[in-house]
Amino acid sequence: MGAVRKALVTGGAGFIGSHLSRRLLNKGWKVFIVDNLSTGFKSRLPSEAEVITLDITSDDFVEYLPEEKFHAVFHLAGQSSGEVSFDDPVYDLKANCISTLRLLDWCLHHNIKRFIYPSSISVYGEKEKQPVKEDAVPMPVSFYGVGKLASESYARIYSGMGLNTTSLRLFNVYGPEQNTQNLRQGMISIYMAYLLKGDEILVKGSPDRFRDFIYIDDVIDVWIKCIDNPNTYGKTYNVASGVKTTVRELLSDLIKTFGYDPLSYPVKFEGHSPNDIFGIYADISAIKEVLEWEPRVSLTEGLKKIVSWAVNNKQNHGSFL
């Protein structure tokens, strides 16, 4: 047997980071998690991982990273909401963009060869031509989107310096262990929070808005497939289902999954999120071709999975619910 592969996962107590960490552990990797637990949860941390409590917004955080020969670095830590980025744009810059630049430079100088970064649909802004392809001109409308786009550019530059980077533009990721306490991030988890309490659902914006929802397991499949695929080095890809779903359609499916009647369950449309785009869904032909990957979980099936998790853990996971 060869040497055990080692991974550094920043943000490993977060929704996507914890799922990725568990998948890597299940594949026999040794995983080191960096998280300051400001938005992540201790209960998400796998017991087999080595956890380093560290704030990536500090100027010297890289000096405290473990001196290990990492096969890959997955940088998922950061501020993860377009709406929240308007509260403190400078913090958003530090948490997302500057932390990425510092970590890229640290990887280069420690001879780490693989760096995978979670970018976002927010880099696109409003687009008339749908579905959106990776070569669409980016026009972010939030500070968060600007930081993600800048981080992609930094990653691409470092890829030309010997660090093999890939940026994955994640669309609307959902699944078990998503945080239903946070009503400013995650359309499905926000609406689910109201349904778990039997409350009227407050929807910011038009029911005709549309998004592209992708289940967490399909997203993690992409991350894993990317690691050793040299055709992904220096590239940026959409990671999505490729399916357009309106808010009205989502609400109907979600309400039905909870066992309520979509025609009678109370829903209130009021206000809007700052600089929220009206609609976007992805062209995923590039990632399908390079990885020979297909999203496997339909929205209907995925909603059943996340609702089952939420209902079964309503009393046991107060940190989530």
Image (tube, grey):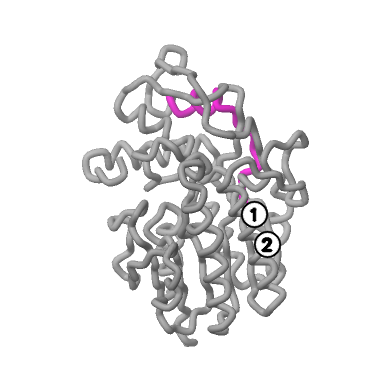
* Residue where numbered disc 2 is placed: 153
Give the image location of residue 123, x and y in percent: 65, 48
Considering depth in this image, is 303 or 49 the residue closer to the camera? 49
Determine which quarter of the picture holds residue 50: bottom left
Query: What is the C-alpha distance between the residues marked 2 and 1?
Result: 6 Å
Considering depth in this image, is 158 or 261 the residue closer to the camera? 158
Neighbours of disc 1 within 10 Å: few (<14), some (14-19), many (20+): many
Question: Where, quadrant-wise, is the C terminus in this rendering?
Answer: top left
Magenta extent: 239-255
Query: Does 170 sit above or below residue 234?
Result: above
* Residue where numbered disc 1 is placed: 149
Q: Residue 252 vs residue 41: left or right?
A: right
Give the image location of residue 205, x and y in percent: 54, 24
Which residue ends up furthest to the top in the rendered image?
264
Q: Is residue 252 shown in magenta? A: yes
Give the image location of residue 127, x and y in percent: 73, 37
Residue at the spot 45% in from the left edge and 29% down from the top edge? 254
Give the image location of residue 145, x and y in percent: 60, 48
Q: Residue 292 vs residue 51: left or right?
A: right
Considering depth in this image, is 313 or 120 the residue closer to the camera? 120
Provide the secondary structure element on which disc 2 rests: helix
Determine which quarter of the picture holds residue 317: top left
Query: Does 229 sit above or below residue 67?
Result: above
Amino acid type of the residue tagged 2 in the rendering: Ser
Neighbours of disc 2 within 10 Å: few (<14), some (14-19), many (20+): some
Q: Is residue 84 shown in magenta? A: no
Marks 2 and 1 close (CB-CB < 8 Å): yes
Amino acid type of the residue tagged 1 in the rendering: Leu
Residue at the spot 60% in from the left edge and 35% down from the top edge? 211
Q: Residue 201 vs residue 235: left or right?
A: left
Provide the secondary structure element on which disc 1 rests: helix
